[in-house]
Amino acid sequence: MSEYNIRIAVEADAEALQKLMYEAFTPLRELGIDWPSVNADLALVKKNLTNSTTFVLENDSEIISTITVRYPWEGQSRISMYPFVWWFATKPSYDGQGIGSKLLTYVEETYLRDTLKAPAVTLGTSARKHPWLLDIYKKRGYEVYAEHESDDGDLGVIMRKVLIPERFDESVLGHPPF
């Protein structure tokens, strides 16, 4: 019987995470998506582990899914003051088993809502190059609050999910960097 465990990743997990992400994001590379997570080398994975909180879901002792939380978006322009989730990947051999959903639910509810008391969470995705993700996130309660058409014709979207309605303040979403 498999036992699933969710924990915060450590630097010793970097190689396994890089391999998992490379495998999981192969279809995105084939679509021409050039995000940091899609082409992350070991140094970038280690930087992500150092600068953010990365969660892993393990089956026995094998890392099979991962997601990272940034506080908040650290960029030239802030997407919002709310946490931002990214680098979300599940081993393809576990597709369709609800593994990624289990990990995302844990991060949204147990970590962000119940532990950090974060009123909302944000994320970004592509609406044209892999539109199925947009629909998956909408079904999970996310809504688009910003769009940007890139030079290559893709439509990038920033989405939010309200976790604690009575504490949510739309004015702290900020202005996306596009």
Image (cartoon, grey):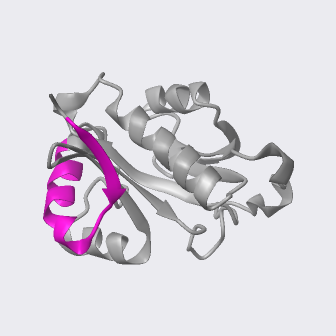
Q: Is residue 67 magenta?
A: no
Task: Indicate the position of residue 100 as horizontal and vertical percent values.
Answer: 37, 36
Q: Residue at x 73, y 53 (%)?
A: 119
Q: Nearer the viewer, residue 79 or 92?
A: 92
At x 56%, y 73%, the residue is: 74
Residue 156 or residue 173, whichever sits in front: 173
Q: Quick check: 178 left or right of 137? A: right
Nearer to me, 43 or 7: 7
Q: Is residue 81 visible?
A: yes
The residue that appears at 26% across and 40% down in the rendered structure is 4
**Number of marks drawn:** 0
Q: Nearer the viewer, residue 49 or 10?
A: 10
At horizontal 24% and vertical 51% (from top left) the residue drawn is 21
**Quadrant placement of the N terminus:** top left
Q: Is residue 27 left or right of residue 139?
A: left
Task: Residue 121: give x, y in percent of width and height.
Answer: 63, 51
> Which region is colored magenta?
3-23
The answer to whether one can see residue 150 in this image is no
Quadrant showing the C terminus = bottom right
Q: Is residue 50 above or below residue 162?
A: below
Q: Is residue 90 above or below residue 48?
A: above
Along the horizontal axis of the image, is 127 left or right of 63?
right
Q: Position of residue 117 (x, y in %)?
A: 68, 58
Magenta highlight: main SS: helix
Horizontal and vertical percent for residue 68?
42, 58
Query: Left or right: 67 with respect to 169?
Result: left
